[in-house]
C-alpha cells in the first residue's frame, strides 16, 4: 500500500516516542547481560531488535492509516465544497 513520504516520516517519529516509552515501562526487555557469550549476546540483541521492529511496524501502520483517513476526509470535504459552489453558479 502506498503511503506518502511525509506520512511515513511523521509515523516514524511517533513510533520513536512509543519505543522510548516502551523502554521505560519495560526496561527489563532491553537488558543484555554482559556475561553472555558472543553467540548468546547476538541472539539477545536479535530478540531486542525483533521487539522494537514489531512496535515500530504496528505504530507506523496505525498512524499512517489515521493520517490517510484524515487526508481522504479533507479531500472529500474540499471536493463537496467545490462542487456545491459550482452548482450554485449554474
Image (spheres, rainbow, N blue to C red):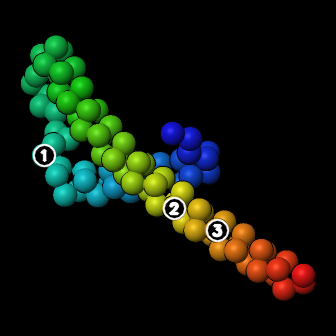
The answer to whether 50 is drawn above or below residue 61 in the figure is above
Residue on which the image places disc 3: 76
User: Quick one: 25 or 32, which is closer to the camera?
Assistant: 25
Instruction: Answer few, some or many: residues within 10 Å of disc 1's Cα (few below 14, many 20 plus, some between 14 and 19).
Output: few
| Residue 79 x/y as whole percent | 72, 69
> Quick one: SS at disc 3?
helix
Q: Residue furthest front?
A: 90
Query: Looking at the figure, which quarter contains the C terminus?
Result: bottom right
Is residue 54 toward the left or the right of residue 13 in the image?
Answer: left
The answer to whether 53 is drawn above or below residue 35 in the figure is below
Q: Name the image quarter holding residue 82.
A: bottom right
Q: Which of marks 3 and 1 precedes in the sequence?
A: 1
> How far apart are the two marked residues, 2 and 3, measured between alpha carbons?
10 Å
Pair 2/1: label in front: 2
Do tag 1 and tag 3 residues touch (Cβ < 8 Å)? no
Residue 48 appears in the rendering: yes
Is residue 72 toward the left or the right of residue 16 in the image?
Answer: right
Q: Which of marks 3 and 2 precedes in the sequence?
A: 2
Residue at horizontal 10%, vertical 22%? Answer: 36
Residue on which the image places disc 1: 28
> Quick one: SS at disc 1?
helix
Q: Name the image quarter holding residue 33.
A: top left
The answer to whether 45 is drawn above or below residue 59 in the figure is above
Which disc is residue 69 wearing? 2
Q: Residue furthest left?
A: 35
Amino acid at each position: 500500500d502506498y503511503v506518502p513520504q511525509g506520512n511515513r516520516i511523521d509515523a516514524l517519529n511517533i513510533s520513536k516516542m512509543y519505543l522510548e516509552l516502551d523502554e521505560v515501562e519495560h526496561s527489563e526487555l532491553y537488558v543484555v547481560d554482559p556475561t553472555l557469550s558472543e553467540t548468546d549476546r547476538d541472539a539477545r540483541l536479535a530478540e531486542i531488535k525483533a521487539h522494537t521492529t514489531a512496535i515500530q511496524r504496528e505504530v507506523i501502520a496505525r498512524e499512517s492509516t489515521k493520517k490517510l483517513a484524515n487526508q481522504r476526509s479533507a479531500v472529500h470535504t474540499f471536493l463537496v465544497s467545490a462542487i456545491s459552489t459550482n452548482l450554485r453558479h449554474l
